[in-house]
Image (cartoon, rainbow, N blue to C red):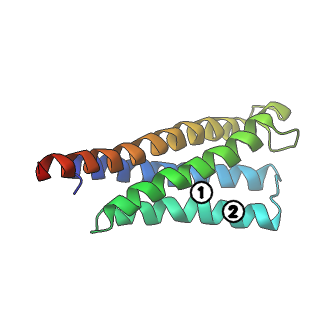
């Protein structure tokens, strides 16, 4: 079982990520950066819902599944957002917009999503791996 300190840190990260996602989504709306229906489904499932479920699972007996779900969902979110915000040749790329007003909010939230998703990948895998090491140590 994970320590409450680890659970609190990951829960805080998940909630911060959620808040950034909401603000980023408002930027999409204000800047009229539309997602296709498939992109919207992916975004809601992988970027919004999966991390929230993972954060909740950390407080149950399925905490290890929560840690892995967090890492996998954040990896999927990072790949999607990283490509669309920094590599693609679309209006979703931060380099293709003005960075004033909502464009500045969009840029800032794109960077913050990259940071929180990277941290989520590392913390989730670390939590799962640490707990396995602890379990192996306690058996010996």
Mark positioned earlier in the residue sequence (2 or 1): 2
Q: Residue 24: x and y, percent?
A: 65, 49
Q: Residue at x 44, y 53 (%)?
A: 14
Q: Is residue 138 left or right of residue 120?
A: left
Image quadrant containing the N terminus: bottom left
Dots 2, 1 in contact, CB < 8 A: yes
Up/down of 126 relative to 73, above or below? above
Q: Is residue 101 visible in this depiction of the protein?
A: no
**Number of numbered discs overlaid on the protein picture:** 2
Q: Residue 30: x and y, percent?
A: 77, 52
Query: What is the spatial separation of the Cα atoms under label 2 and label 1, in whole angstroms?
Result: 7 Å
SS at circle 2: helix
Q: Residue 100: x and y, percent?
A: 75, 32
Q: Residue at x 79, y 35 (%)?
A: 87
Q: Which residue is mark 2?
A: 42
Closer to the camera, 65 or 14? 65
Q: Is residue 86 left or right of residue 77?
A: right
Q: Residue at x 59, y 57 (%)?
A: 47
Locate residue 67: give its quadrant: bottom left
Q: Which residue is mark 1?
A: 47
């Amino acid at each position: 079982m994970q320590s409450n300190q680890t659970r609190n840190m990951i829960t805080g990260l998940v909630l911060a990520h959620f808040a950034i996602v909401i603000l980023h989504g408002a930027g999409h709306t204000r800047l009229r950066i539309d997602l296709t229906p498939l992109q919207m489904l992916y975004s809601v499932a992988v970027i919004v819902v999966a991390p929230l479920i993972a954060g909740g699972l950390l407080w149950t007996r399925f905490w290890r599944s929560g840690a892995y779900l967090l890492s996998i969902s954040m990896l999927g979110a990072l790949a999607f957002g990283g490509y669309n915000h920094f590599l693609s040749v679309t209006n979703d790329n931060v380099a293709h917009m003005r960075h004033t007003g909502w464009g500045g909010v969009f840029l800032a939230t794109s960077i913050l999503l990259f940071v929180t998703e990277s941290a989520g990948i590392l913390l989730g895998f670390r939590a799962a791996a640490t707990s396995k090491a602890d379990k192996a140590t306690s058996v010996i």
